[in-house]
Image (cartoon, rainbow, N blue to C red):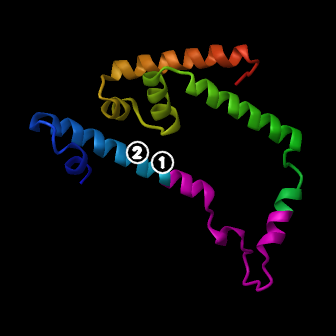
Amino acid sequence: MKLAHHYGDKPIAELPMLFQRILSNTTLDWFRRRKTRNAIFSNMSDFESAGDDSDFDLLETLEALTTSEGTESAQDATERAQTLQQIEAAIKDLPGRQREAFLMRYWEEMDVAETAAAMGCSEGSVKTHCSRAIQALSRNLSAKGIKL
C-alpha cells in the first residue's frame, strides 16, 4: 500500500528497489516497536508469588525490590544516565551511513548480510562503516573520559 500511495508516479523500473526498501524499513520498525514494548511492559505474573496467595500486592513487591541490597545509589544512577546521554550524543555525531550501519549491527543485532541488504550496499561497505564508526566513537568517548 505504501508503494502505491507514495510512489505511484515513479517509473516501473524503480518499483522493485523501492518495494525492497519499504519492506526492509517496515520490518525494522516492527522489530523496534516490539523490542520497546517488551522492555516497557512486563508480564504481571512475573511478580506473583509461587503459591495461590490472594494477598499479593504488586506495590509491596516493587518496594522490596527497590529497597533491597544491590540496588544502585542515586549518584550511580545519575552517572550512568549521564554516560548514556554522552554515548547517544556521540552516536548522533557520526556520519549518516556510519551511524546507520552501527545501529543496525549493534543495536538491532543484524548480521552483516542483513545490514548490507537493508542499506543497499556491499557487505564490505558495512564492515568499513562499522569499523570507522567504532573508531570515531572510541576517540570521542575517550576524549570525554569514558572508558567502556
Query: Foreground residue, 7 or 136?
Result: 7
* Quadrant in which the N terminus appears: bottom left
Disc 1 is placed on an element classified as: helix
Left or right: 28 as drawn, with respect to 73: left
Question: Magenta segment range?
Answer: 34-63
Residue projecting furthest to the left: 12
Q: Quadrant of residue 22?
A: top left
Q: Amino acid at mark 1?
A: Arg
Q: Amino acid at mark 2?
A: Leu
* Residue bearing the label numbered 2: 28
* Residue bearing the label numbered 1: 32
Q: How far apart are labels 2 and 1 at the CA level?
A: 6 Å
Q: Quadrant of residue 144?
A: top right
- 147 over 5 or under it: above or below: above
Disc 2 is placed on an element classified as: helix
Residue at point 74%, 22% (across, down): 146
